[in-house]
């Protein structure tokens, strides 16, 4: 099976994610607001991050399922055509 992404692209993706997440956390930490406001932003950041991962996984899984279903349908059509020929 062919890998979709190079190691360099995967590394760059993770570095980008870590930098963005760390930047957000530093921004929340240095924010001159009460702890309740910082907590609200932190929970929002964590929830948004988790939701992005779950959404990406769901979309990928749905696309893989659709491709697999199309492959199964094509394969069953080929089998039916072979049975008709016999």
Image (cartoon, rainbow, N blue to C red):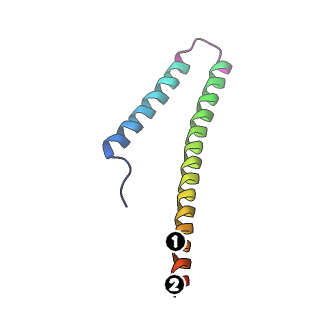
Element at label 2:
helix
Q: Is residue 17 above or below residue 31?
A: below
The boundaries of the magenta stretch are 29-36
Please state the horizontal and vertical placement of residue 51, each as a whole percent of the image. 61, 39
| Apparent side of residue 36 relative to residue 70 in the rendered image (left or right) | right
**Mark 2 crowd level (few <14, some 14–19, many ≥20, 10 Å Cα):** few
Q: Which residue occupies 31% across, 41% down? A: 8
Q: Are marks 1 and 2 in contact (CB under 8 Å)?
A: no
Please state the horizontal and vertical placement of residue 3, each as a whole percent of the image. 36, 54
The residue pinned by badge 2 equals: 85
The single residue placed furthest to the top in the displayed view is 32
Please state the horizontal and vertical placement of residue 20, each as a whole percent of the image. 46, 28
The residue pinned by badge 1 equals: 75
Along the viewing direction, whichever of 58 and 66 lies nearer the viewer:
66
Q: Which residue occupies 53% across, 56% down? A: 64
**Picture quadrant of residue 10:** top left
């Amino acid at each position: 099976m062919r890998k979709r992404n190079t190691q360099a692209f995967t590394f760059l993706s993770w570095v980008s994610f870590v930098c963005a997440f760390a930047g957000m956390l530093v921004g929340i930490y240095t924010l001159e607001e009460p702890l309740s406001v910082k907590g609200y932003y932190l929970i929002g950041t964590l929830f948004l991050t988790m939701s992005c991962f779950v959404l990406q996984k769901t979309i990928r899984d749905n696309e893989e399922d659709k491709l697999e279903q199309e492959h199964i349908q094509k394969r069953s059509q080929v089998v039916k055509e072979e049975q008709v020929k016999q």
